[in-house]
Image (cartoon, rainbow, N blue to C red):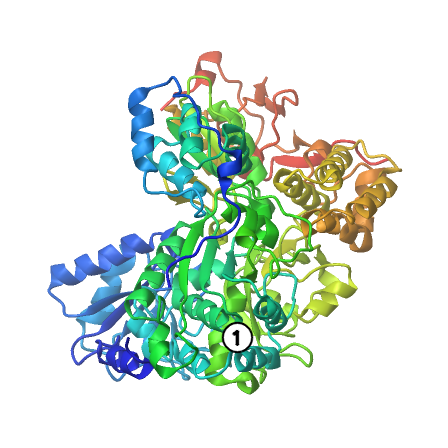
């Protein structure tokens, strides 16, 4: 049997909206993307997903278009949009690292990983750097806990990560090599006796 | 419309996944957890290796055995010999596997890669995969819901039907709706999502509603971090859920169903949608299910169809009224009950919300009978329950055991307990709202009562294990952060209560705890118990169980400003305590240049140190974590 949808229609809170200023091409494309969806059919999230799939986020200027399609007000729509953490309203950064916030990762040291990612990439969790080059995204546990603690990048899972691995990964993303450890003294078996004093030039180390 | 017998015959006729003469069968499990470690690459490598060598073999994709710790898993079966499971079979090991297990004419086992053999006896030193022993992870398991997991191709309806699938639906259609509900009631099945309410009773409520259309809703918003049992079922045996929902639709008079899957689960969305499409093609969903109009199961026949709704990242959408609001295109905020969904659910129509695992039990109950179903389990609770194991265990995975099994059998037996050299500290049984079970109580039975007696919930089945390197206060901070972050914002008791709890806990963990804090937290918890939905009511559970079972550790934080596990960042600092040749490496790795070399010796610049632990990883002997506030 095909679907019966029932219940209150959204028409009561619907007011026709004036055409909105904005990128005409973008709005036309969005209209096309959500053309086959209907307002009373549990399909708003589908609309969000499709737009996000196409653009990486839901551009703010598309909200009136979606509202018109779903016969509701931009305010109602923004309320829904704002509620879901996986729907974003800012463009994603060029390089996004997804950090798993789950408990298995936490118990295995994910906070340390978060700290070094934030420190090296130069942005807080759930933010992008000012130039939009790097972004950190907090994601929820999806049950790949045998890799805890893990991060994901472009759909690839990286784990279990040690803090040192993470630092190397982040430096690689930044395009900086790890500074070579400067040996304390040339020929001596290290660890024994007094370390030799290093010259300042050697201390700079060689960036790979 | 074909009858069930015709479908079954058709399914039997479709080529069955068995090895032929000179033609071994190779199964590769491809699910979220195995794809994360390269199962897709393994699958491609197997196909390529076979083609390159010109070998004859069938390659099949399957679901997941639940042995997450040993993914990717490949099974090789030869005609007349027991099949062998190979674990951790990444693409680079494929040539070795094909060489040893397929290309030769000998026994065809590569013992050094093998994990288990699908027989009762060991083979070439490889342990058997059986509940009675052999592979530790399987000991004590009773695989009913998971009978097809890892065995069949989740994208093949024929394989499901040929193993008895949809027989339960066919049987149900030969009964009255009342008889079906009675069968479910008799089995004693209760909701597996956490609330443990009788499934049969719930269905009775919906059947009693006089308004149509009615809806069946499957709650697959498995938001509890650390639980992934529903994901495995949907990925490995999606038809089980389709069948369960169709039976529920018949029993309650519902004509349409929604499966609400969380956004974090893209593969289950794919596989459930494929299953629904196939079921529709075979007449198992649609306007006339299994030709019921002719057989007279119900005047006019039984009509039922399903649709997948993909969530968008919200924990409270796992609460049934929140889930309904989300389906209705609004903010997924829970509502006050009553009215219950059975009276006014989605689109204000009568609806029934059950968990994935609850629905998955139903086909088995109908097919095998309530008596069979009740043959395992404890005195008060019949049937099996799936659990996922993660955190500080040696074997992370998903398993299915009879209800009432001691938790220690799962955590210490199957999971192997904490890593070598570590002691079990606690188990966090199922979701952020469920509390923390101390190690001394790890032997309690896995059924709702023992948890309730301790002021906790058994929850949905995600066991997260803590060892002595973990701090309970730190975990409480995580769960209160989660509860605060995911609070929908409707009740002040919840959104402000969780925030206050979080603030207080953070203060304690930074060494600024006050002696009045426990009392304030108790008062908050008391107030929060008046929140409208379970999210707010249960959010303080973890703090309350900390008071009950970990008071000593909490007091150590509160009064001595010391974190015994040295986890709470505000209470520790890093210091160079010895000299070692690893210190230059520590200096190089430090992301904030906090390891400083001065006159040949090293120190940590506390102003720069972010306490990330990288230097100690590099120089574990030289660098130590010490208490910030020192003794006394």
> Left or right: where does residue B405 sit relative to residue B557?
left
The quadrant holding residue B456 is: bottom right
The image shows residue B183, relative to residue B325, as above or below, that is below
- Residue at the extreme bottom of the image, as rendered: B371
Q: Where is residue B182 in the image (x, y as percent from the top left)?
A: 58, 81
Q: Where is residue A91 in the image (x, y as percent from the top left)?
A: 41, 26
Q: Mark 1 lies on which chain?
A: B
The quadrant holding residue B448 is: bottom right
At x 69% / y 78%, what residue is drawn? B380
The image shows residue B554, relative to residue B2, as above or below, that is above
The quadrant holding residue B80 is: bottom left
Q: Quadrant of the N terminus of chain B?
A: bottom left
Q: Does residue B396 appear anywhere in the picture?
A: no
Q: Position of residue A123 (x, y in %)?
A: 51, 24
Which residue is identified by label 1? B141
Secondary structure of residue under mark 1: loop
The image shows residue B356, relative to residue B496, as above or below, that is below
Nearer to me, B481 or B205:
B205
The image shows residue B474, relative to residue B417, as above or below, that is above
Nearer to me, A127 or B616:
A127
Q: Does residue A195 appear anywhere in the picture?
A: yes
> Left or right: where does residue B70 sit relative to residue B480?
left
Task: Characterize the local packing of mark 1: few (<14), some (14-19) or many (20 or more) Cα atoms within 10 angstroms.
Answer: many
Q: Quadrant of the C terminus of chain B?
A: top right
Nearer to me, B110 or B426:
B426
- Residue at the extreme left of the image, as rendered: B54
How many numbered circles does the render carry? 1
């Amino acid at each position: 049997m095909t679907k019966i949808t029932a219940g209150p229609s959204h028409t009561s809170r619907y007011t026709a909206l004036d055409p909105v200023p904005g990128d005409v091409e973008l709005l036309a494309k969005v209209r096309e993307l959500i053309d086959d969806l209907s307002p009373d059919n549990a399909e708003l999230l589908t609309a969000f997903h499709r737009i996000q799939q196409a653009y990486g986020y839901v551009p703010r200027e598309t909200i009136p278009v979606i509202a018109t399609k779903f016969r509701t007000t931009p305010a109602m729509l923004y309320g829904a949009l704002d509620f879901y953490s996986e729907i974003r309203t800012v463009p994603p950064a060029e390089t996004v690292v997804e950090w798993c916030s789950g408990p298995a990762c936490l118990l295995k040291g994910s906070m340390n990983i978060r700290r070094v990612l934030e420190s090296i990439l130069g942005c807080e969790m759930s933010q992008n750097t000012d130039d939009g080059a790097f972004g950190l995204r907090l994601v929820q546990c999806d049950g790949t806990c045998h890799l805890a603690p893990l991060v994901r990048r472009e759909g690839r899972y990286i784990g279990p990560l040690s803090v040192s691995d993470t630092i190397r990964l982040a430096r690689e993303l930044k395009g900086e090599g790890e500074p070579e450890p400067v040996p304390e003294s040339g020929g001596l078996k290290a660890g024994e006796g007094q370390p030799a004093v290093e010259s300042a030039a050697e201390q700079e180390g060689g960036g790979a | 419309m074909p009858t069930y017998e015709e479908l079954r015959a058709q399914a039997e006729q479709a080529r069955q996944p068995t090895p032929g003469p000179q033609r071994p069968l190779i199964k590769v499990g491809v699910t979220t957890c195995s794809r994360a470690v390269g199962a897709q690459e393994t699958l491609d490598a197997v196909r390529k290796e076979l083609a390159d060598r010109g070998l004859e073999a069938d390659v099949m994709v399957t679901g997941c055995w639940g042995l997450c710790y040993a993914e990717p898993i490949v099974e090789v079966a030869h005609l007349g010999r027991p099949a062998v499971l190979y674990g951790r079979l990444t693409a680079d090991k494929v040539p070795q596997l094909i060489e040893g297990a397929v290309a030769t004419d000998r026994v065809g086992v590569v013992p050094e890669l093998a994990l288990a053999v699908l027989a009762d006896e060991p083979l070439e030193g490889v342990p058997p995969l059986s509940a009675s022993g052999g592979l530790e992870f399987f000991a004590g398991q009773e695989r009913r819901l998971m009978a097809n997991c890892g065995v069949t191709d989740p994208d093949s309806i024929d394989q499901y039907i040929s193993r008895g699938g949809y027989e339960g639906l066919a049987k149900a259609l030969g009964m009255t709706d009342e008889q079906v509900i009675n069968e479910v009631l008799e089995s004693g099945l209760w909701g597996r999502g956490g609330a443990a309410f009788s499934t049969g009773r719930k269905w009775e409520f919906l059947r009693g509603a006089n308004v149509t259309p009615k809806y069946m809703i499957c709650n697959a918003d498995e938001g509890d971090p650390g639980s992934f049992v529903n994901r495995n079922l949907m990925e490995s045996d999606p038809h089980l859920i389709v069948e369960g929902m169709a039976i529920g639709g018949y029993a309650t008079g519902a004509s349409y169903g929604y499966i609400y899957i969380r956004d974090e689960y893209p593969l289950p969305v794919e596989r459930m949608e494929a299953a629904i499409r196939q079921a529709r093609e075979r007449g198992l969903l649609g306007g006339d299910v299994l030709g019921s109009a002719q057989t007279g199961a119900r005047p006019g026949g039984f009509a039922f169809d399903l649709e997948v709704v993909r969530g968008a990242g919200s924990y409270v959408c796992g609460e049934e009224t929140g889930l309904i609001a989300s389906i209705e295109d609004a903010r997924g905020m829970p509502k006050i009950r009553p009215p219950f969904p059975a009276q006014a659910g989605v689109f204000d129509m009568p609806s029934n919300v059950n968990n994935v695992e609850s629905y998955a039990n139903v086909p088995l109950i109908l097919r095998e009978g309530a008596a069979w179903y009740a043959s395992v389990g404890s005195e008060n609770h019949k049937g099996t329950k799936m659990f996922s194991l993660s955190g500080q265990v040696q074997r992370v995975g998903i398993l299915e055991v009879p209800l009432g099994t001691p938790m220690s059998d799962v955590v210490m037996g199957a999971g192997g307990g904490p890593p070598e050299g570590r002691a079990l500290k606690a188990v966090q049984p199922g979701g952020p709202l469920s509390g923390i079970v101390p190690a001394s109580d790890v032997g309690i039975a896995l059924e709702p009562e023992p948890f309730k007696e301790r002021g906790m919930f058994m929850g949905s089945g995600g066991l997260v294990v803590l060892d002595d390197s973990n701090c309970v206060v730190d975990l409480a901070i995580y769960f209160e952060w989660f509860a605060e972050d995911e609070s929908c914002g409707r009740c002040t008791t919840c959104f402000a209560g969780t925030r206050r709890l979080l603030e207080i806990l953070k203060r304690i963990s930074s060494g600024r705890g006050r002696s009045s804090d426990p009392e304030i937290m108790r008062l908050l918890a008391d107030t929060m118990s008046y929140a409208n939905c379970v999210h707010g009511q249960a959010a303080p559970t973890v703090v309350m169980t900390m008071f009950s079972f970990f008071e000593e550790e909490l007091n150590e934080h509160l009064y001595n400003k010391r974190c015994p596990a040295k986890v709470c960042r505000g209470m520790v600092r890093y210091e160079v305590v010895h000299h070692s040749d690893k210190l230059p490496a520590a200096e190089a790795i430090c992301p904030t240049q906090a390891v400083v070399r001065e006159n040949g010796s090293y120190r940590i610049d506390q102003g720069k140190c972010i306490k990330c632990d990288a230097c100690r990883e590099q120089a574990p002997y030289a660098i130590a974590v010490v208490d910030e506030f020192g003794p006394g």
